[in-house]
Amino acid sequence: MIEKKEIGLEKAVLVGIVTKDQDEDKLKEYLDELEFLTYTAGGRAIKRFTQKMDMPNPKTFIGTGKMEDVKNFVEEHDISTAIFDDELSATQERNISKILGCKVLDRTNLILDIFAQRAQTSYARTQVELAQYEYLLPRLRGMWTHLERQRGGIGMRGPGETEIETDRRIVRDKIALLKDRIKTIDKQMAVQRGNRGKMVRVALVGYTNVGKSTLMNVISKSEVFAENKLFATLDTTVRKVVIQNLPFLLSDTVGFIRKLPTQLVESFKSTLDEVREADLLLHVVDISHPNFEEHIESVNKILGEIESNDKPTIMVFNKIDAYQAEPPIEENDLETERTNKYYSLEEWKKTWMGKVGNNALFISALNKQNLEDFKKRVYDEVRDIHITRFPYNHFLYPDYEEEESQIKVL
């Protein structure tokens, strides 16, 4: 009988710096996210190291004294991985590895690793592989310097290709091959999208882990993989959804994140064609996250990069069941400033949220709160697009309340 074996999480330390562009609060938030990324990848953050610097050290990212502290901690606690919050250059990665004597990753490498774990389809795996090779190419020298030395002596003189040059050529050839493969798959997917006819297309977009897949499951009554981890969904899922008697296509796309690696944005642009070709976007936001406004900015920035920020969009604030405002400030407390973290949901609705996209929606996909309001709003928006496209069959789709009353009579 095979015994059950517990697989322990890798022990890791997190390293970040406070700069003029990134204060302590911002760094704490980024490190919280990095810790969640580490957990998603299969690691456990044991300790955080931070340092105030005008700019990162070009050789070791952090100062020599702080690096010594990290080294001592790594040795004393048998740490296997050091994870840096910002992207490291090839030189920095090589130098830090020599000092710490353990595996060294940056945020980009960590996200690439999660993507590699999560990719299910051939298309997603090809995109991740391309991003990994593009990340690897400039770092080959640091990884393979021991192969670069040519042996001298009899029979070894004259022109020749060093090991590092061979490796670079192999990686470049692989990148070209993967790009060609993606172009082929893109053509196939374009044909598939064309075969869907002129049905209205709706795409779920948003930051990672905001509940897009959970909402997709509730609305489409399907079983899309959903988990409380970052990047649970990599493969775009498209489902036919019918609200009342109105059919449309709903797609669940990969979540976005701050400091998203350039290689991933480039290689996943083709996956985001579902967003580009959508008639309506549902921008899902986790309102229970303390920095959800920054998440909205990050998503809007990436939507701008893929030329999709001018599409009709409904803002959907999810996880209202998990939202908690800070405790009210006491009347005699004259020092504490009442910022938006003290706002109740009702107060939030009176801010810019009440004016964005013809009023935002507040729901809980998990507990199915306010889903009727959500369905009615989506029905109305999709119906308007459908009637514009097919003006001769508008009588098939009455107002949401009329259709609902007809169903009850039947």
Image: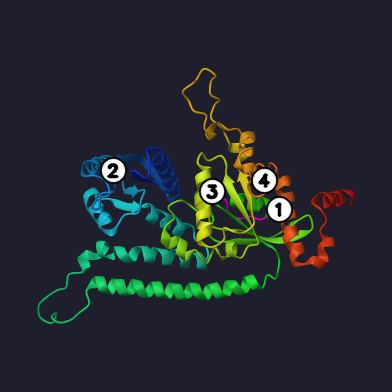
**Magenta run includes residue 224:** yes
Q: How is the image coloured?
A: rainbow
Residue bearing the label numbered 3: 296
Choose the circle earlier in sequence order: 3 or 1. Answer: 3
In the image, is residue 352 above or below residue 125?
above
Q: What segment carries the magenta color?
A: 222-228
Proximity of marks 4 and 1: CB atoms separated by less than 8 Å: no
Sequence-first tag of 3 and 2: 2
**Any mark on residue 359, and which?**
4
Q: Is residue 12 left or right of residue 144?
A: right
Residue 141 is inside the magenta segment: no
* Residue receiving disc 1: 378
Q: Secondary structure at mark 4?
A: loop
Are there few (<14), some (14-19), or many (20+) residues within 10 Å of tag 3? Answer: some
Residue beneath the point at 61% across and 37% down: 348
What separation in Å lies between label 3 and label 1 (alpha carbons)?
Answer: 20 Å
Under circle 1, the secondary element is helix
Q: Which residue is mark 2?
A: 53
Of marks 4 and 3, which one's residue comes earlier in the chain?
3
Q: Secondary structure under badge 3? A: helix
